[in-house]
């Protein structure tokens, strides 16, 4: 794509895996498997287009209340991602990061995640940021308590440094697949000036063409950040 203004940071709410599976009379875990493949393809496409940060909402704090069978499937996908798929990422010079409260995840998953972050290339040009047991209100509450325990009054700038996303710029573009028109507790502080893109496409069907379409929509917009 020529003459396209590429967002530095894209964040994606990957919704619709369950409905995609249901349409095929398959269990929800089948949809999550397909979703993970779509996520990996999307990361490759984002990197190829020149995006620098891709944040994906892989597990919300609310998702932790799902039935054990579905959660076990999601934890197994995380295990697979951090034992197998990250190696391809590293080989391509990309790094993995996480946001969210890891402490509620199974011990072995926490260890795999810590290793995955630690073993990432130091000089990465592209970051996949997995939101795991992530909820913006939980993140903000944790940040407030961290500031209080240091006895610090915060400003808009210093507050950002207490958030899980402190290493990353705010998202330029937030995409939500699956037809719902809401943010569902995702990056509420960071989304202040993000451009939003909603599509009915279910996440497993959100392919490279769809990602390109979302970026094209973004690049045609006039961002004023409240100014004239
Ligand atoms: C929402 O769809 C999606 C999720 C709860 C999980 C998203 C996870 C992936 C796409 C891949 C997982 C990758 C890793 C590394 C864990 P939904 O199930 O709520 O769909 P529905 O709204 O159709 O029911």
Image (cartoon, grey):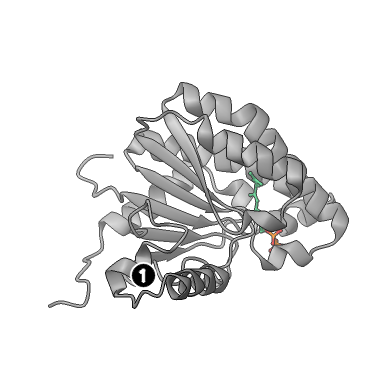
**Depicted 62 relative to depicted 24: above or below:** below
The image shows residue 144 at horizontal and vertical percentages of 47, 74
Helix, strand or loop at disc 1?
helix
Q: Can you tell which quarter of the image residue 85 is in?
A: top right
Q: Residue furthest top?
A: 91
**Depicted 201 relative to depicted 109: above or below:** below
Q: In the displayed structure, does residue 190 sit left or right of residue 30?
A: left
Q: Can you tell which quarter of the image residue 20 is in?
A: bottom right
Q: Quadrant of the C terminus?
A: bottom left
Q: Within the displayed image, which quadrant is ligand 1 positioned in?
A: bottom right
Is the C-beta of the residue carrying label 1 under 8 Å from the nearest atom of ligand 1? no
| Residue under pointer 1 | 159
Q: Residues within 10 Å of mark 1 (few under 14, many from 20)?
A: some
The image shows residue 222 at horizontal and vertical percentages of 21, 66
Q: Is residue 24 visible?
A: no
The image shows residue 36 at horizontal and vertical percentages of 64, 42
- Which residue is at 46% across, 35% downward? 95
The image shows residue 33 at horizontal and vertical percentages of 72, 42
Q: Quadrant of the N terminus?
A: top left
Closer to the camera in the image, 65 or 27:
65
**Depicted 173 relative to depicted 37: above or below:** below
Q: In the displayed structure, does residue 47 sit left or right of residue 6?
A: right
Q: In the displayed structure, does residue 12 sit left or right of residue 202?
A: left
């Amino acid at each position: 794509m020529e003459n396209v203004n590429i967002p530095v940071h894209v964040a994606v709410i990957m919704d619709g895996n369950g409905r995609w599976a249901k349409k095929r009379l398959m269990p929800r875990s089948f949809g999550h498997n397909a979703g993970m493949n779509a996520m990996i393809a999307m990361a490759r496409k984002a990197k190829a287009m020149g995006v620098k940060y891709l944040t994906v909402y892989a597990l919300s704090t609310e998702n932790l209340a799902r039935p054990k069978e579905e959660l076990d499937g999601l934890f197994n996908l995380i295990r697979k991602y951090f034992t197998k798929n990250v190696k391809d990422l590293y080989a391509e010079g990309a790094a993995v990061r996480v946001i969210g409260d890891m402490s509620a995840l199974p011990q072995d998953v926490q260890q795999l995640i810590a290793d995955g972050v630690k073993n990432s290339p130091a000089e990465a040009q592209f970051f996949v940021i997995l939101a795991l047991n992530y909820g913006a209100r939980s993140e903000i509450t944790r940040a407030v308590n961290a500031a209080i325990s240091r006895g610090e009054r915060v400003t808009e700038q210093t507050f950002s440094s207490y958030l899980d996303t402190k290493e990353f710029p705010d998202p330029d573009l937030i995409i939500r697949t699956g037809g719902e028109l809401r943010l569902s507790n995702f990056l509420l502080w960071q989304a202040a000036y993000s451009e939003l893109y909603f599509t009915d496409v279910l996440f497993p069907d959100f392919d490279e063409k769809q990602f390109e379409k979302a970026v094209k929509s973004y690049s045609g917009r006039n961002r004023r950040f409240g100014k004239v």
